Amino acid sequence: MKKPANASARAGFSVSKNSKADTRNLIEAGPDPQAGLTQVSHRINTLCEPIVAAKFWRNRRGEAVVVRLKEYKGRALADIRVFVGDKTGRLVPTTKGIAVKMSKLPELAAAIRRAETKARALGLLGVAITDLGVTVDEGGLP
């Protein structure tokens, strides 16, 4: 009998890749008495619907910035986009924004934190009092 090439195959698992959706499915081939496993089927998380992580008003014209986690063409993305109100009052996305692979999200978050730190050091933002959970704006009002 031929031995499996990788550790997952030795444990009774097979990894298949769906090229159309670009998602990986991890499927156990069946009960394996040596591994002591029972039959299980597991799919790596996918986003059926966009998840809104944050939303705030950009200006008084009714534009909002929406941070979403979504899937596009089988790829999980972090999407930061400007939304505007349509005639019915619903917010709809515009082309103004950025979408990055989920693997780049920590880099993007670190870059935004560095930009905030530099803006505070230059006096472009108010002073944050994080111990009390209060942010004092340039006008002096919390």
Image (spheres, helix red, strand yellow):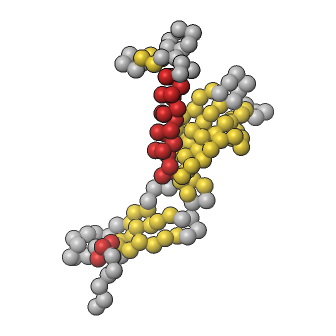
The furthest residue to the right: 87
The furthest residue to the front: 122
Of the pair 102 and 110, the residue shown nearer to us: 110
Look at the image and tell me in which quarter the N terminus lies: bottom left
**Residue at position x 42%, y 17% in the image:** 129
The furthest residue to the top: 140
Q: Where is residue 55 in the image (x, y as percent from the top left)?
A: 57, 32
Of the pair 136 and 2, the residue shown nearer to us: 136
Q: Where is residue 75 in the image (x, y as percent from the top left)?
A: 55, 57
**Residue at position x 72%, y 32% in the image:** 85
Give the left or right position of residue 23, taking residue 2 as reference.
Answer: right
Give the left or right position of residue 33, taking residue 70 as reference.
Answer: left
Q: Where is residue 43 in the image (x, y as percent from the top left)?
A: 43, 62
| Quarter of image, res 12 | bottom left
Q: In this view, does 45 lie above or below 57?
A: below
The furthest residue to the bottom: 1
Q: Position of residue 78 (x, y in %)?
A: 55, 46
Q: Is residue 38 above or below residue 112?
A: below
| Quarter of image, res 73 | bottom right
**Residue at position x 51%, y 28% in the image:** 118
**Residue at position x 69%, y 40% in the image:** 96
Residue 70 seen: no
Q: Is residue 24 above or below residue 54?
A: below
Residue 79 seen: yes
Give the left or right position of residue 91, taking residue 8 as reference.
Answer: right
